[in-house]
Image (cartoon, rainbow, N blue to C red):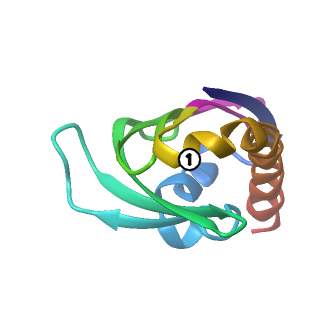
Amino acid sequence: MISYESTVTIDRPPADVFPYFVDPAKQALWSDVQMRRLAHGPAGPRMEVSFGMGPMKARVGLEITALEQDRRMAWTSFSGPIRWVGEYRLEPVGAGTRVSQTGTLTFTGLWRLVEPIAGAEIRAGEVKELERLKAVVEAS
């Protein structure tokens, strides 16, 4: 299992930051993981994310399990080769927003072979994504 967590402070209020998590067009401005909306599932909205490592590409279905406007978004996977549970939290800090993310990924099937190699890459990538989010939101 791969665990990650990171935090960044963005010089904008939560209402300016939150849309960058839920709007696929805005999410594409800062994330390497492509998101596509799907129909609602039993717990909430669903999306499919696609990402790859070298010649391997994965599509993972995610279901939003918590969505609190300007405060929190959590998800869990429902399909694909990776079991993923994650969360973004937004907290007001003065005139800005502290964004925290946590998650765990468990690779299944043949993907288990790349899990040890992918761990450090995923952790570093999650930090870089939040830094890109900060730059994109503050530039808008």
Judge by depth and name the residue closer to the eye, 20 or 111.
111
- Front residue of this view, candidates 132 and 106: 106
Q: Residue 77 location, x and y as percent?
A: 39, 41
Residue 135 image offset from top left, x and y in percent: 84, 59
Instruction: Name the residue tied to disc 1.
Output: 111
Q: Residue at x 53, y 56 (%)?
A: 19
Left or right, 94 with respect to 1, comes to right
Is residue 28 inside the magenta stretch?
Answer: no
Q: In this view, does 50 lie above or below 62?
A: below
Give the answer, above or below, for where 103 lies relative to 115. above
Compared across the picture, whether 13 is left or right of 18 comes to: right
* Total marks in image: 1
Picture layout, residue 36 above or below residue 4: below
Q: Which quadrant of the figure has residue 101?
A: top right
Residue 2: percent from the left, percent from the top?
Answer: 66, 29
Q: Residue at x 74, y 55 (%)?
A: 133
| Residue lying at 77% horizontally and 42% vertically, measured from the top left | 117
- Is residue 98 shown in magenta? yes
**To which quarter of the image does residue 83 belong?**
top left
The amino acid marked with disc number 1 is Trp
* Quadrant position of residue 74: top left
Extent of the magenta region? 87-104
Quarter holding the C terminus is: bottom right
